[in-house]
Structure formats: structure tokens, C-alpha cells
Amino acid sequence: MTAPLKSVEGTGDLATAMAAIGRGARAAARTLALAAPAQKDRALGLMAAAVRAQKSQILAANAEDLGEARGGGLTGAFIDRLALDEARVEAMAAGIEAVRALQDPVGRITESWTRPNGMTIERVRVPLGVIGIIYESRPNVTADAGALCLKSGNAAILRGGSDSLRSSRAILAALTQGLREAGLPEATIQLVPTRDRAAVGLMLGGLDGAIDVIVPRGGTSLVARVQAEARVPVFAHLEGVCHVYVDKAASLDMAKKIVLNAKMRRTGVCGAAETLLVDRAAAATHLKPLLEMLIDAGCEIRGDKAALAVDSRVKPASEDDWSTEYLDAVIAAGVVDGVDAAIAHIERYGSHHTDAIVTDDAAAAEKFLREVDSAIVLHNASTQFADGGEFGFGAEIGIATGRLHARGPVGVDQLTTFKYRIRGNGQIRP
């Protein structure tokens, strides 16, 4: 049995506690910015070992969270995101090790040049500072975010979901042990110790300048609130309305494999396909088999007239269905007149997250990849590759669909900025 959950009662007490967390993170960030890569990597290795060593404590804490969530009648998709087992704990530890193996971005010179007056200028990567991560249900984010922030030289303030607080706290205990044994500040990774939602508001205000960037990971309401209220920059996506377009030149076997994986591998992730579009020129051969496959796999189809005509189990799609992120075994399906119509549909209804084309036509594929304005576009691959680990980033702190600084999976490189270092030998400006 884990210890009772601690809370900070009263607005004044909460504000005081959060301000202290912010000060601790800012001090830790100054230390981390100068930490040697070897020291950070040692901490990451020790953190992974501690996660494995404390597996039983982590799973016991998660069992309590799951029991409370089930008692509260939460959905199966939510329970799946919250649940940990031995494989998922091992995946957390392996993810930390994968981040450890990455090249350290801090101090990397990305460009240098010499001016006619003899001054040399170089652009060098430096940490962002303090990253605030606000997330729901997924306790593994505690490990992923902590590892990525440490590798990139940033301090992290984590506000996990209230339903996963015990699990996140148990994971944090392992991360803290690794930091302590490596001689790094324990305030490098901190978890907000309360379920009080007022803590989120304090983080969005920046904690008196302590927080440099906010990363929300959760449902639409959370992300919308963060984007509306944050007084600091935000890396985020509001929704993952992801599409798979099956072109007339698509192999049916490949299309079936990709569509099934994109929708049903894990329905609750932001890279899950929410809309299937089939080229009208391929509808006679491809539409019915694709819909039957999804229905047989337990997926509800909400379709247009063409989809309704090929299977009586298809339900009629409303206008809202085309722009809905279901995060469940539900998909909207319809027919479009070729790649141009598919691109237009995605532009109208999509969320600029992740979209895929299945085709053997290289010209159609290049058109789709060039013209679809999403953070991630794929040819002949599942949308569920929208993941920093699958990009070789070790892990991700989230996926951003904005156009400034970070777009797509946010990994260690995206958690740095840069400064210019100039070296002269007495130059003055005339």
C-alpha cells in the first residue's frame, strides 16, 4: 500500500508551494546547463536501473490508481492509457536508456562563420531552461519527460493527471534516486504534489518567470485551456484528427495492413487514424474489404453514402464526424475524387497532425507529401508512427502542430534553443 496522497490545502499554501517548486527548478536549470554530458548520462543510466528495481512499487501504486479509476466509471480507453504492466515499466526503462544513447545537443555548434573584420560568430545549442509538462492519465510521461528534459539540460516541473498521481509519484521516486546518485539536483525533475487544479493555473502563469515553456499532453479541453491561458510559450497540438487516404494505385493488401494498424493498434493515441478516405476510382475494389476488415476487428464505421451502400453495419456520418478525434474504436469513412480531393478534405477537416497516403503511384505520393500541411505526412506507412521513439528521438515530450520553434515530435533537440558566441580581437563598430 502506498502512502496517503499529500495535498496542499488553501490558495495561499498552494501558491507558496508552487513558487518554491519554481525556484528550485530554476536553480536546478542553471546547474544542468553546465553539467557534463557524462554526468547527465550517468544519471539517466541510474534512473533506468531504479525504474527496473522499483517495478513492484510502481505497479502497486498503479494498481491503486486503476482501482480508483474503475470505481469512478472511467472509459476503457482511459483505463488503457492509465494502466501499467511489467512490459510497460520495462518500456519506460528502455526509453530512458534510448534517450541516454542520443547525442547530447547542448553545446553543439550548428553554424559558424568569420566576418570581414575578423570576428568569428558561431551559433550554439543551449537548454530552454525550465519545462512545465501538464499531462493526463499516462504515467509513463513522467519518465519520458523527465529523461528528455535532463538530456537536453532542462529542469522539469510535472503536473500529472489526478487519476495517475500515485503511479507518477512512484516513478518519480526512481528518477530522483538516479539524480541523487549521480550528484545532480533532485529539483531537476519535480512533480506537483496535489490534485488541486489551481496548480495548473499557477503553472500557466509561469510561476513568477520560473517556467520557460509549457507542454500539455491530454484531451482537447486541457490543451485548449493551456493555449488560451498560458503566459509562456506552448508546444502542443489541440487534436489528432489523422487521415489515411487510399489512392486508386494502392495495393489492397498493403492498404488493409496499414489501415488496420493505423486505426486499431492503439485507438487512444493521438496518431490513431480517425478518418479513412478511399479514391472513388478504387472504391469498387477497395472500399468494401477495408470496411469489413475494420468492422470485423471491432471498429464502428460512420460513413458517407458510398460507405453506407457497401455494408449495412455502417452508420451514417454527421458533419461533425469528419473533424472528430474519437480516441476509440470508431472511424469516419468516405470516398473522394482522387488525391486533390483528399488533400482538400484533410485541409478542411484535419488538425495538421499526421496524415498518410497509400499508393504505388510515386507522383501522387509526392503531391500528397508536398501539399498536405501537417506536422507529419507519410507514404505507405501507418499514422501510428507519429511518435518520437519511432523517429529515433528516444522518446518525445509531445507532438507540436504549431509552426514556431518545434513541429512534430518534440525530442531533445527541440528542447534546446541557441545563442550566438562571438570572438574578436579588439574590433569596434565604426
Image (cartoon, helix red, strand yellow):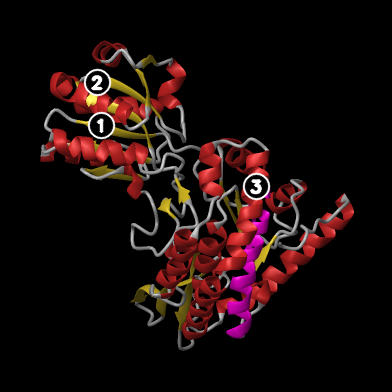
Please report the residue visible at 59 percent of the width from the left and 37 percent of the height from the top.
224
Pointer 1 with pointer 2, Cβ within 8 A: yes
Whether the magenta-drawn stretch holds residue 396 is answered as: no
Residue at left offset 86%, top offset 50%: 11
Q: Which residue is mark 3?
A: 67
- The residue at which mark 1 appears reads as 245
Question: What kind of residue is marked 1?
Answer: Tyr
Magenta residues?
A: 156-182
Disc nearer the start of the sequence (1/2): 1
Residue drawn at x 11%, y 32% as measured from the top left: 249
Q: Which residue is tagged 2? A: 336
Residue that extends furthest to the bottom in the rendered view of this protein: 425
CA–CA distance between discs 1 and 3?
40 Å
On screen, 85 above or below 196? below
Q: Nearer the viewer, mark 2 or mark 3?
A: 3
Magenta span: predominant SS is helix
